[in-house]
Image: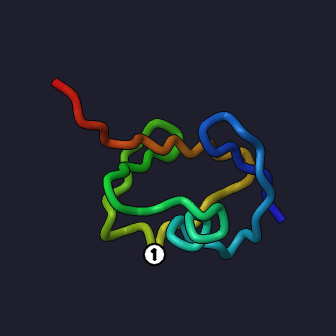
Amino acid sequence: MISIKVNSTPHQFHKEDALEHILKKLEIPTNGIALAVNQNIISKTDWHTTTLNDGDQVLIIKATQGG
């Protein structure tokens, strides 16, 4: 198991879990969001292959509408 922070909240996951799988476990909808790992934006096409390391920080940015 590894410890990562998702939007500053600590979580435990298996080292093999890819970003896409982590979002499913956390029940986070994938439409309208962007992800950064350790301040590096990860393309949505890479979510299914990007795995994390102990201590990584994931930032989920949600698109909003406004005017």
Question: Residue 5: image x %, image y %?
Answer: 69, 43
Identify the residue at image location x=79%, y=52%: 3
Identify the residue at image location x=67%, y=75%: 16
- Where on the picture, by quarter, is residue 1? bottom right
| Placement of the C terminus among the 4 image quadrants | top left
Question: Residue 26: image x %, image y %?
Answer: 65, 61
Q: Mark 1 points at which residue?
A: 48
Q: Left or right: where does residue 24 sit relative to residue 49?
A: right
Q: Left or right: where does residue 23 sit relative to residue 47?
A: right
Question: Residue 24: image x %, image y %?
Answer: 58, 70
Q: Compared to 48, does 62 lie above or below?
A: above
Q: Compared to 46, does 5 lie above or below?
A: above
- Where on the picture, by quarter, is residue 30? bottom left
Outermost residue on the top side: it is 67
Nearest the camera: 66 or 52?
66
Is label 1 in a helix, a strand or a loop? loop
Question: Residue 38: image x %, image y %?
Answer: 53, 40
Outermost residue on the left side: it is 67
The local crowd at label 1, few if under 14, some if 14 to 19, many if 20 or more residues have their Cα within 10 Å, is few
